[in-house]
Image: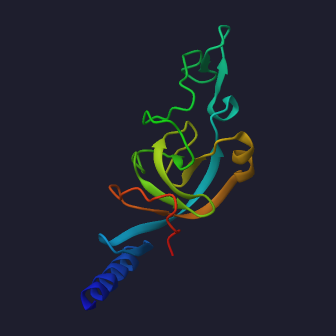
Amino acid sequence: MHGKFVILTMALLAALALGGCTVFFLDPDDGLTYGRIVRIETTAYCPCGLCCSWKLDKRGRPVVSAGRDRGKPKAVGITASGKRAHPGTLAADTRYYPMGTLIYVPGYGYGVVEDRGGDIKGRRRLDLFYNTHAEARRWGRRKVEAVVFPPGTPAVPKNAPPPR
């Protein structure tokens, strides 16, 4: 017990010295899991054509409706990582949050970066996936203090409580 206290104290002192804020969670299986609190502006998206810039062409096939790929076929509901989007899918700037990064967003829950967005630039932007346009509009645009876990942190089960 004393060893864990020393580790926690040293980690907190290091976080304060480096100017960051780190949150620690005790995990009974792996020991200590930590995350960094980051103030992030979030928006929401769904697989509809309005959110994901696609439309149906003359033959009824989905195509990109804007940008440099305009008119090219669009795989609706498939993320940049090649997986099907689902609640818990996050779009981020992968220069800062690589694919597979686990993030806890208050009011949304745990999510994993599996997508990129054209307007998602920088470390302070995140896009949250919802199944319907109504749900995405309800979320709107919010600034939250999210917990970003380090790469390689295992995915958290859906019934996991939020970090404290």
Q: Residue at x 34, y 75 (%)?
A: 28
Vertical position of residue 119 compared to residue 61: above or below: below
Quarter of the image for residue 14 reads bottom left
In the picture provided, is 160 more to the left or to the right than 66? left
Toward the top, the furthest residue is 59
Q: Position of residue 149 (x, y in %)?
A: 41, 61
Q: Residue 60's spot in the image, x, y percent?
A: 66, 13
Q: Residue 138 location in percent, x, y?
A: 74, 51
Looking at the image, which residue sits at the far left?
3
Location of residue 47 (image quadrant): top right
- Residue found at x 44% / y 74%: 23
The quadrant in which the N terminus is found is bottom left
Q: Residue furthest front?
A: 159
For the image, the number of numbered tags is 0
Q: Name the colour scheme.
A: rainbow
Q: Nearer the viewer, residue 142 or 133?
A: 133
119 or 128: nearer the viewer: 128
Give the vertical position of 140 relative to 37 (above or below).
above
Q: Is residue 36 above or below residue 103?
A: below
Foreground pick, 31 / 105: 31
Where residue 96 appears, as percent x and y from the top left, is 42, 50
Picture quadrant where residue 117 is located: top right
